[in-house]
Image: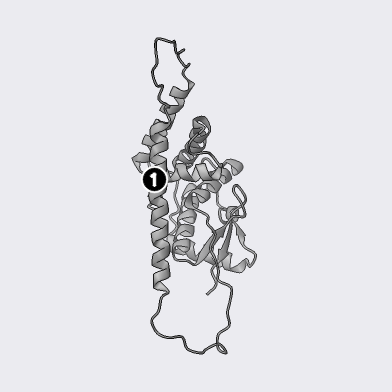
C-alpha cells in the first residue's frame, strides 16, 4: 500500500483564528455564538482537510471535540430553578467566548504593530528631490483581504460540487508534480487572463495529489507576491490576478 499524500501547511494560525474567520464571515455575535451552526461550519473545514489529507495540528481536532461537547451541553434539557435553589447556571460557551475575545485583542494589536512597521519602512530622512517630470504615478495594486480559510472553503465547495472526494484515476499510481513546475504553470495561466482567473479553473485534474500541489503552488505564489486573490463579498467566487511588475 502506498503512503498517503500528506502535506503540512504552516499558514494556518490555529483553531481560534478559524473560529474568528467564521464569526466574521457569517456575521455572528461573538457574545452569543450559535454553537450548532459554528460547529457545522467548523467541521466542514476539518472534512476538507481530511479529504485532501492535509496534516493539521492536533489543536484543530481538540477544538472540534470542544465544540461538539459544548453543543451537547446546549442540547441538554435545562433544570427548573426552584425558589430554594438560587444557583448561577454557567453558559457552556462562556470559556470559549472569553478565549476568542482575548485572541481577537492580541490579533488586532499584532495587526496594528505590523501596520506601524510597514509605515516605518517607508520613512526616509533624505529630503525630497524634484523628479515630477520623470515619474508616472500608477494606482497601487491592493491585494484582496482573502484569507487562507476563504481559499480552503472555496476548495471544499469545489470538491463537493465536482464530487472529487476520491481520485478518479483507475490505475494505482501517483504522478508526483514538483511544486516549482506547478507554480510556473499557474502563474502562466493567471498572467494570460487580464480579467482574472476563477479559482475553480486552476483545478482541472481529478487527482488528489494534483489538487494539493496546485493549492500549495498557489499559496507560494501569493506568499511571493506574484499573484493575489480577490473576492467581492463573502461566499462569492474567488478570482486570481497577477501582480503588476
Instruction: Work out whether residue 235 or residue 202 is closer to the camera in this orientation and state it.
Output: 235
Tell me if residue 191 comes above or below residue 207 in the rendering.
Answer: below
* 22 left or right of 8 in image: right
Residue 160: horizontal and vertical position, in percent?
Answer: 57, 41
Residue located farthest toward the front when viewing the structure as drawn: 83
Residue 123: horizontal and vertical position, in percent?
Answer: 41, 75
**Residue at image location 49% in from the left, 48% down from the top:** 149
Instruction: Work out whether residue 99 or residue 142 is closer to the camera in this orientation and state it.
Output: 99
**Residue at image location 45% in from the left, 14% down from the top:** 79
Residue located farthest toward the left when viewing the structure as drawn: 58
Instruction: Work out whether residue 212 or residue 81 is closer to the camera in this orientation and state it.
Output: 81
Q: Is residue 98 visible?
A: yes
**Residue at image location 52% in from the left, 37% down from the top:** 41
Q: Secondary structure at mark 1?
A: helix
Instruction: Work out whether residue 44 or residue 129 is closer to the camera in this orientation and state it.
Output: 129
Q: Quadrant of residue 27?
A: top right
Query: Which residue, given by chain and number where applicable, does mark 1 sit on?
Result: 103
Q: Residues within 10 Å of mark 1 (few under 14, many from 20)?
A: some
Tell me if residue 240 comes above or below residue 91 in the rendering.
Answer: below
**Residue at image location 55% in from the left, 87% down from the top:** 132
* 58 left or right of 31 in image: left
Residue 6: horizontal and vertical position, in percent?
Answer: 39, 47
* 157 left or right of 78 in image: right
Tell me if residue 92 comes above or below residue 61 in the rendering.
Answer: above
Tell me if residue 205 comes above or below residue 165 in the rendering.
Answer: below
Residue located farthest toward the right when viewing the structure as drawn: 195
Q: How is the image coloured?
A: one colour
Quadrant of the snapshot with the N terminus: top left
Residue 190: horizontal and vertical position, in percent?
Answer: 57, 64
Q: Is residue 171 visible?
A: no
Amino acid at each position: 500500500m502506498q503512503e498517503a499524500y500528506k502535506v503540512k501547511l504552516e499558514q494556518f494560525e490555529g483553531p481560534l483564528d478559524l473560529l474568528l474567520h467564521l464569526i466574521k464571515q457569517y456575521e455572528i455575535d461573538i457574545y452569543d455564538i450559535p454553537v450548532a451552526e459554528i460547529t457545522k461550519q467548523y467541521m466542514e473545514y476539518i472534512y476538507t482537510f481530511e479529504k485532501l489529507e492535509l496534516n493539521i495540528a492536533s489543536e484543530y481536532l481538540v477544538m472540534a471535540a470542544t465544540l461538539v461537547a459544548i453543543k451537547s451541553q446546549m442540547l441538554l434539557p435545562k433544570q427548573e430553578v426552584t425558589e430554594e435553589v438560587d444557583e448561577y447556571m454557567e453558559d457552556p460557551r462562556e470559556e470559549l467566548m472569553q478565549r476568542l475575545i482575548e485572541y481577537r485583542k492580541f490579533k488586532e494589536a499584532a495587526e496594528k504593530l505590523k501596520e506601524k512597521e510597514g509605515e516605518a519602512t517607508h520613512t526616509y530622512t533624505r529630503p525630497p528631490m524634484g523628479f515630477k517630470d520623470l515619474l508616472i504615478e500608477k494606482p497601487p495594486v491592493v491585494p484582496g483581504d482573502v484569507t487562507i480559510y476563504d481559499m480552503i472553503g472555496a476548495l471544499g465547495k469545489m470538491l463537493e460540487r465536482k464530487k472529487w472526494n476520491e481520485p478518479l484515476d483507475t490505475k494505482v499510481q501517483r504522478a508526483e508534480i514538483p511544486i516549482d513546475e506547478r507554480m510556473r504553470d499557474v502563474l502562466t495561466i493567471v498572467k494570460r487572463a487580464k480579467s482574472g482567473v476563477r479559482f475553480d479553473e486552476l483545478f482541472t485534474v481529478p487527482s488528489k495529489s494534483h489538487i494539493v500541489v496546485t493549492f500549495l503552488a498557489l499559496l507560494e505564489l501569493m506568499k511571493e507576491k506574484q499573484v493575489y486573490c480577490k473576492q467581492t463579498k463573502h461566499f462569492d467566487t474567488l478570482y486570481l490576478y497577477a501582480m503588476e511588475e
